[in-house]
Image (cartoon, rainbow, N blue to C red):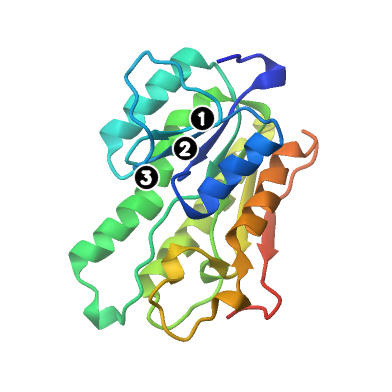
Amino acid sequence: MDSTSENRPILVAGAGSGIGKSVLENLNLLNKPAVGISRTGVEWKPGETFEFGRNFRCNLARPSEVTEFVSSLKIQCSSLAGVYFTFGSGLFKPVEKIALEEWNAHFVLNLNSLFLLTKELLPTLRPGSFLCYLSSTAGYQGFPESTAYCASRHAIAGFAKALREELKSDGIRVITVYPGAVYTDIWKGREGFDQDDMIPVDDFGRWLATLSTLPDAVYPDEIRLLPRKGIL
């Protein structure tokens, strides 16, 4: 990897499908050096070069895989231009039907993995770098049969708000995006929602990728985006 200031790579965590996949594809179209990770990515071995534009295997719910990947990334690249945190799962049930094991697994991926990846990557960030966290409309209001999802998305928003205060003196930008309904696999099988009412995933990914083009001095804080019909 070329780790000069002009060609610092961007990491897309959760690039195997949905929003993350679209962000990685659109960063490629913008000629931004980018690398993706997800549990469905291609296998790699420690010491191998990570090729720009590709999605590599890393199960973000397994701490050992996160630390191993970041260690290899640091060897090849001393600094990152930015990181997109686009991964997460949905858990949509009445609260009395949620098993503790389901609840814990949901938070391991949606919050614990996000914390660990952030912590491990902080040494690679420089003034002008950005961290972009995806929350949701469920990160600022409640929805029925969504207690776990709303709790985790509120937690991501709170984490990002506090981290912004920690890092602003270092010139590192922390951006929280609260999208409304974007059509991804998380909506499949859920009754009462129409795909045509949602933001197409590639439209959203194309917009999200443009955050990487902002001047270093521009510090977005919290951004809310909704489909035409508003909150569904």
Q: Which residue is mark 1?
A: 122
Give the number of the disc on residue 118: 2
The quarter of the rendered structure image containing the N terminus is top right
Question: As shown in the figure, which amino acid type bears the numbered disc 1?
Answer: Leu
State the image coordinates of residue 22 (x, y, percent, origin top left).
57, 49
Residue type (three-letter) at the residue carrying disc 2: Thr
In the image, residue 226 sits, relative to residue 31, either above or below, namely: below
Q: Secondary structure at mark 1?
A: helix
- Residue shown at 42%/62% (left/top)? 152
Q: Earlier in the sequence, mark 3 or mark 2?
A: 3
- Give the Cα separation between the discs numbered 1 and 3: 14 Å
Whether tag 1 and tag 2 are in contact, CB under 8 A, the answer is yes
Q: Amino acid at mark 3?
A: Ser
Residue visible at 54% across and 23% down in the picture: 124
Q: Nearer the viewer, residue 227 or 144?
A: 227
Quadrant location of the C terminus in the rendered image: bottom right
Q: Which residue is mark 3?
A: 113
Secondary structure type for disc 3: helix
Q: What kind of element bears circle 2?
A: helix
Out of 109 and 221, give the one closest to the viewer. 109
